[in-house]
Image (cartoon, grey):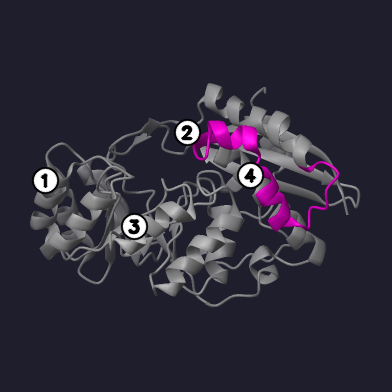
Amino acid sequence: MKITKIEPFILHVPIAQKQISDATNSISHWGIVGAKISTDSGIIGYGYTATHAEVTGDRAIANIISKALAPQIIGENPIEVNMLWHKMYNQANLRWVGRAGIVHLAIGAIDVALWDIRAKSTGQPLWQHLGGSTCEELEAYNTDIGWLSNPIDSLVRQSQNAVNEEGFRRIKLKVGQKNPTADVARIKAVRKAIGPEISIAVDANGKWDLPTAIRFCKQAEDLDIFWLEEPLWYDDVESHARLSQATSIPIALGEQLYSIDAFTLFFENNAMCFAQPDVTRLAGVSEYLRVADAAYARRMPVAAHVGDMGQVHVHLSFFHEMTTMLEYIPWIAHCFEEPIKVENGLYAKPQMPGASTTLLASAEEEFGVAL
């Protein structure tokens, strides 16, 4: 089999709530920037990376896909994913200008498409192609109700609905306000409404400094917080390690880490309790699996960051032995032939061949952005 064509694409999909915000971002659309890879066998692979739907940045990613990466692998066998990943990753001119950032997002989109082709060529969903499922039940935790832009009365109401009507046993709330006491008040209101048996994780999106994070933890420790996600600046290993020593609340992070080397620094400094790799930052499935295996070597739980990459991460989560839960943010599910699906708080196992990344033609037509 040979790669005959690589076509970049951009979609900007409006989110259901029209406008949401966390401690650092406010958005109305979600970006899907990706690659459609055609082969001489007729198999077509789709891969994408998730963005905040900013046209200039999205076009830059698409340009790297078409101008810098596609010429490197057209004519190659798409089944040789490991070789092609290293060929793209080690391209000297790209490595010189970006060993992270948009270069990784572009490589990630192509790498996901290659894995999609591999799985399709065997007639298997990706989780099965990788070696099969290690769990029959993959719990979903609902982040989509927990935005800081959601007023406290609505937050309480939606949390109750997620638990009582939709069957979620886990939710995640955004924190990171200037005064952490305000965040604690929101958590207390939700905890009172949904009871002690439901897991509540919280996410500060890298907003706080160490003293503020310690203040928050002191106030929140009796609320049974499942984890505190990205409390501090993403690359600050030392402060995360100090915070981990100062609180009984487990620390989770990883969505902003771009390599196994970055994860290893946090692992070796005992600066996290939950690893949250993301195929977009890690330049695809290939490096994601290396990170997940490194976590396994330390018996550390893995909970992939969705960032609405759930279409791919659901496969990796069913496959990998350190994963028992996955974030649920369904903003773009309706754009794919086999959308992610959650029932009674559990993910359904994908059944169609591939990585569940094949776009609907109708989605490309409705949400497509000119390159």
- Identity, as a three-letter code, of the amino acid under mark 2: His
Q: Which mark is residue 90?
A: 4
The magenta-colored residue range is: 73-102
Counting residues from the start of the chain, the first of labels 1 and 4 encountered is 4
User: Mark 3 = which residue?
Assistant: 266
Residue at the location (57% across, 47% down)?
283
- Identity, as a three-letter code, of the amino acid under mark 3: Phe
Badge 1 element: helix
Q: Residues within 10 Å of mark 1 (few under 14, many from 20)?
A: few
Counting residues from the start of the chain, the first of labels 1 and 2 encountered is 2
Label 2 to label 3: alpha-carbon separation = 26 Å
Asked if labels 4 and 1 touch by Cβ distance under 8 angstroms, the answer is: no
Q: Residue 295 falls in which quadrant of the image?
A: bottom left
Badge 3 element: helix
User: Mark 1 = which residue?
Assistant: 211
User: Mark 2 = which residue?
Assistant: 52
- Identity, as a three-letter code, of the amino acid under mark 4: Asn
Q: Is residue 173 above or below residue 71?
A: below
Along the line of sight, which residue is nearer the eye, 335 or 87? Answer: 87
Q: Is residue 283 above or below residue 250?
A: above
Q: Residues within 10 Å of mark 3 (few under 14, many from 20)?
A: many
Counting residues from the start of the chain, the first of labels 3 and 1 encountered is 1
Label 3 to label 1: alpha-carbon separation = 20 Å
Along the line of sight, which residue is nearer the eye, 202 or 206? Answer: 206
